[in-house]
Image: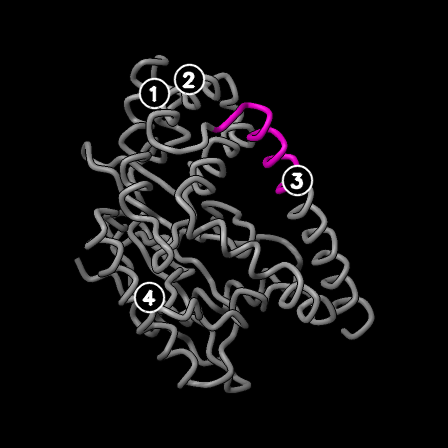
Amino acid sequence: MNLALSPDSLARLEAAVDTALVRADEGELRVLGYGEISLVLAWGDGDDARACKRLPPFADEGCFERYRTSVERYLGVLEAAGVVPVETAVQAHRQADGRLVGYCVQPVLPEGSLLPDRLRTLGEDDAVALFERVLARITGGVSPALGIDAQISNWAEVDGSLRYLDISTPLMRDEAGAEALDTNLFLASLPWALRPLVRWVFLRAILDKYYDPRCAVVDLIGNLHKEQLQALVPAFLAAAAAHVEPAITEREVWSYYREDARMWALLQVLRRADRWWQRAIRR
């Protein structure tokens, strides 16, 4: 399947994004989902429909090509570790000021295939069986060299097969523990004044959890609260006890979710304040 958008289609998508930014509303954009860093847009219709995750601008073409190479390597490393990723293409559009804006392009998945939606249709036993399949991918794939953002909304079941969605942050480390990802891209959505603080105080701790199987499972189960699926927490904890040590407790999950939600809520408030400053004061 050729996922790549034509240059003309990509230019029209970016023009629609620019219009939405100027008007401060979604306009003609169709938003599939809001993430903590970026958002996913639907573009095209029918068989040509794509899910497009817009990335922050790249400093130059070299930065973009290094990122694209990293994502392509990540896709292969994930699959080799038993985590099947959704097919992904990485493209860039050059803006009028010369900057490159990147997009991760994926197929639009069938309605109801995301795991939060699937879990809402299942009884507890079937929900636990589905969770155990995800659990096997996490415990078999996550390592000090390979990270996964394992929250439940990053998984889908398509034609009976599990797929992992979140490819835009290629989480790989070398033997010295250095990130393959240019972390400037990870920080680019934050207000510029916050970036040094987050880089030196919080970034390592934020990223470390993705490389630890137990932390990844805690994150996944904690995400059930966000998805209004908290009734499944006790059953999922019981299933996870056979795979992670020490056993995860309900109190630990709730504490983790609460602190994680508070951190991202604070960052979102600061981002909105920065957008107001950029729009209203700096124009």
The residues bearing labels 3 and 4 have C-alpha atoms spaced at a distance of 29 Å
Tag 3: residue type? Glu
What secondary structure is found at the residue carrying circle 3? helix
The residues bearing labels 1 and 3 have C-alpha atoms spaced at a distance of 26 Å
The residues bearing labels 1 and 2 have C-alpha atoms spaced at a distance of 9 Å
What secondary structure is found at the residue carrying circle 1? helix
**N-term mark: 3 or 2:** 2
Magenta span of residues: 248-260
Q: Residue 190, position in %: x, y?
A: 65, 64
Residue under numbered circle 4: 71
Q: In this view, does 275 lie above or below 283?
A: above
**N-term mark: 1 or 4:** 4
Which residue is nearer to you in this view: 281 or 241? 241
Residue under numbered circle 1: 127
**N-term mark: 2 or 4:** 4
Q: Residue 35 carries which label?
A: none
**N-term mark: 3 or 4:** 4
Q: Residue 259 carries which label?
A: 3
Q: Is residue 69 above or below residue 143?
A: below
Between disc 1 and disc 2, the foreground one is: 2
Tag 2: residue type? Ala
**N-term mark: 1 or 2:** 1
Res 160 quadrant in image: top left
What secondary structure is found at the residue carrying circle 2? helix
Residue under numbered circle 2: 235
Q: In the rendered image, which quarter contains the N terminus?
A: bottom left
Res 277 quadrant in image: bottom right
Q: Residues within 10 Å of mark 1 (few under 14, many from 20)?
A: some
Between disc 3 and disc 4, the foreground one is: 3
Tag 4: residue type? Val
| Magenta stretch holds residue 166 | no
